[in-house]
């Protein structure tokens, strides 16, 4: 039997999921690939993989989409790793550079600009090393591990998950486990059990990562306080609201 191909985001926030999968019997049944969010999305859309931890903004683009897990990459309030950085306040921003690694965050900042901040900046798709281009009235959306250490680099930092909650009163889902075909209930149960293993070991995982001094952040606080992994009803409601906004962009 051929292995199911799975693409998972390689960011810090996915480490518990990766740990759970790698420490389960499921590894005999899957081909696990580590990618940036936009690559996860493209692989799932192109049928290169069967399952992806993908930016939720791509769900409507899939010919067939099944959310197969009760776990996600979400946030209730500040997420700390998806932010708009600027040297001027929102009403003075003229241009916003959009992180090439994400689809959901790019869409989210456009929703916030229109619905919450009431601004109409020029949008520019960014390329590698754009993180140093924040200057004057040019701001940038930066996501993932590259945000660690930027807390005090720029005058203004707007956390997009926190801003979303101000707008809607709901938590935000950045990425969900989605398959592009129907999978057996047996596999889905084993898959969720594997993910649960990782989340149950999050303290030891964060301690091990912190000892490596690989990230410029408090790993334990980030994984246990900023990231919220349960795809519960409030997050499902937030996801539905986001997908509704998506249709009007």
Image (cartoon, grey):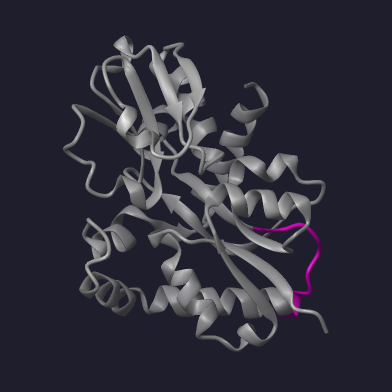
- Which percent across, then down, holds residue 96? 42, 22
Bounds of the magenta segment: 178-186
Q: Residue at x 66, y 87 (%)?
A: 28
How far across and down, in percent of the image, does residue 235 sit? Answer: 51, 48
Residue 243 at x, y percent in the picture: 62, 35
* Residue 201 visible in this rendered orientation of the protein: yes
Q: Is residue 214 above or below residue 26?
A: above
Q: Quadrant of residue 199?
A: bottom left
Q: Position of residue 192 (x, y in %)?
A: 59, 73
Look at the picture and state if 154 lies above or below 48. above
Specify whether 118 is left or right of 104. Answer: left
Name the side, left or right, on which 159 lies relative to 52. left
Of residues 79 and 37, which is closer to you in this image? Answer: 37
Q: Residue at x 52, y 56 (%)?
A: 232
- Give yes or no for residue 183 being in the magenta stretch: yes
197 is within the stretch colored magenta: no
Q: Quadrant of the N terminus?
A: bottom right
Q: Quadrant of residue 142?
A: top left
């Amino acid at each position: 039997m051929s292995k199911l191909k799975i693409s998972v985001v390689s960011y810090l926030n996915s480490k518990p999921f990766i740990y759970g999968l790698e420490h389960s019997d499921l590894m005999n049944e899957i081909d696990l690939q580590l990618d940036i969010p936009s690559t996860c999305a493209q692989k799932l859309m192109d049928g290169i993989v069967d399952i992806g931890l993908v930016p939720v903004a791509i769900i409507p683009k899939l010919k067939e989409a099944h959310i197969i897990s009760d776990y996600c990459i979400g946030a209730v309030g500040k997420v700390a790793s998806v932010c708009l950085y600027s040297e001027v306040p929102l009403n003075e921003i003229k241009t916003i550079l959009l992180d090439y690694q994400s689809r959901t965050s790019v869409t989210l900042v456009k929703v916030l600009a229109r619905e919450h901040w009431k601004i109409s900046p020029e949008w520019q798709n960014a390329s590698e090393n754009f993180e140093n281009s924040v200057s004057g009235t040019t701001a940038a959306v930066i996501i993932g591990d590259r945000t660690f250490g930027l807390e005090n680099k720029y005058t203004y930092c707007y956390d997009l998950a926190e801003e979303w909650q101000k707008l809607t009163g709901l938590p935000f889902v950045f990425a969900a486990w989605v398959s592009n075909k129907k999978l057996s209930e047996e596999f889905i149960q084993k898959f969720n059990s594997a993910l649960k293993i990782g989340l149950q070991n999050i303290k030891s995982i964060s301690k091990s990562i912190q000892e490596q001094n690989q990230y410029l952040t408090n790993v334990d606080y980030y994984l246990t306080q900023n990231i919220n992994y349960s795809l519960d009803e409030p997050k499902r409601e937030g996801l539905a609201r986001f997908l509704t906004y998506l249709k009007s962009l």
